Amino acid sequence: MPPKYDPQAVEAGRYNEWLQDGLFKPSGDKKAHPYSIVIPPPNVTGKLHLGHAWDTTLQDMIIRQKRMQGFDTLWLPGMDHAGIATQAKVEAKLREQGISRYDLGREKFIEKVWEWKDEYANTIKTQWGKLGLSLDYSRERFTLDEGLSAAVKKVFVQLYKKGLIYRGEYIINWDPQARTALSDIEVIHKDDKGAFYHVKYKFADGETTLDGKDYIEIATTRPETMMGDTAIAVNPSDERYKDVVGKKVILPLANREIPIIADQHADPAFGTGAVKITPAHDPNDFLVGNRHNLERINTMNEDASMNEKAGKYEGMDRFEARKAMVQDLQDQDLMIAIDPIVHSVGHSERTGVQVEARLSTQWFVKMKPLAEQALKNQTTDDKVDFVPERFEKTFSQWMENIHDWVISRQLWWGHQIPAWYNKKTGEIYVDEQPPKDIENWEQDKDVLDTWFSSALWPFSTMGWPDTDAPDFKRYFPTDTLVTGYDIIFFWVSRMIFQSLEFTGRRPFKNVLLHGLIRDEQGRKMSKSLGNGIDPMDVIDKYGADALRWFLSNGSTPGQDIRFTYTKMDAAWNFINKIWNASRYVIMNLGDMTKPTLPAEDQWDLADRWILSRLNKLIDQVTEQFDKFNFGEAGRALYDFIWNDFCDWYIEMSKETLNGDDEQAKQNTRNVLAYVLDQTLRLLHPIMPFVTEKIWLTMPHEGDSLVVASYPVTNAQFDNEKAESQMANLIELIKAVRNIRAEANAPMSSEIDVLIKTSNTELAHVFETNRDYIDRFVHPKALTIGADVAAPKLAMTGIITDAEVYVPLAELVDLDEEAARLQKEIKKFEAEVERAKKKLANERFVANAPAEVVESEHQKQAENEAKLQATKDRLTALQAEK
């Protein structure tokens, strides 16, 4: 092994070896418990970003651990056709060439989109490989493949026949660039500059007045829709307008009469209390129009240009028409005032253009019964468990207030709706297969919302609607879905209600929700801010394992994380520490063929201690993985590797390996190799490349860590006594080192160390481990006893059940030593006070595990003893002065 960790050399070719060996496929062991995950299919719109890297790294960690634990694991990959998003990308590319989709026609355009899909799907798979994702590519799916298309058709037809899919004319969100309908959650609201335009609507009879004026004042933010006005509404309780209800006004610019109606929609407290009603261009006005049987006049084309209903403004873009109408209103003395405002305006999530509310005939899913079924299921044993639990409330609230889902999209890329219209009669035919006399029918040109097909992803990818499909029977319902909290509405909720409707089961047992990756300043990464980070660039510099370590170690369910290169440097340094520690171990293993622990009676204190610490580590990491607390698992691994294994056990092993006792050397080699082997196994799900490289370099059994067994605790290793004794030894060593540092006495300088203790067991520990004390402290002389007297000029360390004196007559300043002891007193006082407050907290005592409460009592007692000993030493020192 080279002396420095080189991620490029370590990772090169490894992923292809794993693929060639078929290590990512299910084991096929029917006795093993199945565990399955379906990947949230990325859109074939471009490269993966850091959020994808985070999402898939967490999934890979879960599936790698379960595979090592003996589960029959399936992690199924795939991608989403992403209708509007992909079509928008391809259309933008064509526009650069001066071509539109209409120039090509539907079939040729679809060919172009498939070319795009193939290119970006290959890019995504390459990125998956660089991340080390252990996916079973033999089961890869695509939301437009043949099997998923069959599932989509079946679902549409069944919902239609059940009366849960219907076709109707409604106001919908319209993207005028993509020329398609949008669901509510595909609309992003942003603050835009606008204005309130105060316009005169004059009374038609020329006689009626209101407060002495011959008009009623209407304020609107959208004068371009005025040509579609069909009424003025006032609240029936508004006394100001009771005498004009039923009257008519002249619609400005159109010279058309429209009525004044009374409707609760008008808010007396807002503006003038009178509002124009435009049923074809506003969802609330649409409902008012239905109540009053008003005409619906659509004044815009699909591209948001004005149509023939807009009169002289026909052909103008909507915003050009606004300017022209405002000018005409001013010229005709119909504009009262223009008040600038900033207001929230809907924009298309995919194209970014301002959304229009447009009257349109669309296909809808009736959501109420499906939502009720999903909510009811959350009260059963088959419920979906949300992690963190608080997101179940987010899910439930949305389901309780859900609107019907507009599922038709005016696109060419996607699942074409399985509905045909008779060319002569207009009759609608809905079925999975086209009508036999197809020449008399025309298929609906629209496609289905992308989320309609991706909502079926957990079961359609397993072979449904064939309920006898082997994967469906074996791996559905899936176990865990990992995704961002931002798509609970888009995707998670839809998978739940579709799965319940068509399989009778939840789609997954757990849904682990993570947050967003933000930049160093906490901002969301975006193209506009120029703060996006390409995960492949990070891998090229630091390696996949370092990126994976950062993504897992900063991971708390449901929380955002911040990306910084400082954290990446720390991740690389940690792996380099593991590399160098492993290199030291391997260099000292000699001709060992496999690690074999010596008999328990041959373990020294360091052996007993590190094996007990390893046991605790295995227990903690396994527990935290099961809870999806990967950050806590990472912290436990970091502390064990850096502190217990590297700083202490490896350093202690050098004393034995440099000695003359061959049996002791062999014992230490085996413990070193065993602990390293087990640690690499625990680390493997997080950092697979470097652990595999090290493990294959050292003595091992098996072909790959990918399928090696995961560590389990061994009751024989539990040894609280050894942990306590080693803690005492470490505390002593640290105390003397601190004294050396305070006195500027380097390790090469000779010092005497005196330990005063009346605890015979502690004295025995120090006596029997003099070799370690010699190695780490370098005393010229070491004295241990109950009757040790404190030298007049000495520095003092207070440790558990003992006092440590280091005579440094020529270096010790009594005033400085007194000041140092006073600082120690304050430190111990703070610790005692902290423990007292914690133990006085009734909620802590009642809810914390008994061992945690007992530990706090023990810490309090130890710190009280240290506090008293330090005070006593300070008093003695002051007496010496």
Image (spheres, grey):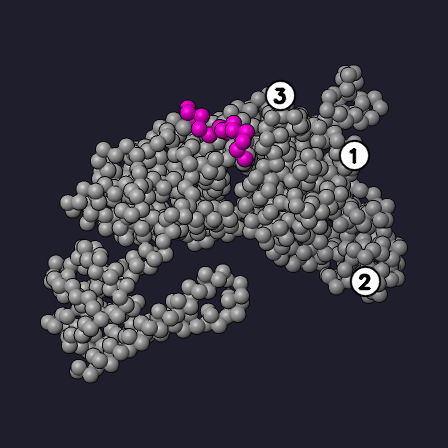
Q: Amino acid at mark 3?
A: Glu
Q: Position of residue 582 (x, y in %)?
A: 28, 41
Q: Disc 3 versus disc 2: distance between alpha carbons? A: 60 Å
What kind of secondary structure does the magenta stretch mostly adopt?
loop
Q: Which residue lies under the disc numbered 3?
A: 107
Q: Is residue 270 magenta?
A: no
Q: Which residues are magenta?
A: 19-33
Q: Nearer the viewer, mark 3 or mark 2?
A: 3
Q: Nearer the viewer, mark 2 or mark 1?
A: 1
* Residue at the image position 50 percent from the left and 70 percent from the top: 841
Q: Is residue 241 left or right of residue 686?
A: right
Q: Amino acid at mark 1?
A: Lys
Q: Is residue 804 left or right of residue 677?
A: left
Q: Which residue lies under the disc numbered 2?
A: 213
Q: Amino acid at mark 2?
A: Lys
Give the quadrant of residue 442: top right
* Residue at the image position 73 percent from the left and 21 percent from the top: 433
Q: Which residue lies under the disc numbered 1?
A: 162
Residue sitting nearer the eye, 147 or 665: 665
* Residue at the image position 18 percent from the left and 74 percent from the top: 790
* Residue at the image position 21 percent from the left and 42 percent from the top: 663
Give the quadrant of residue 669: top left
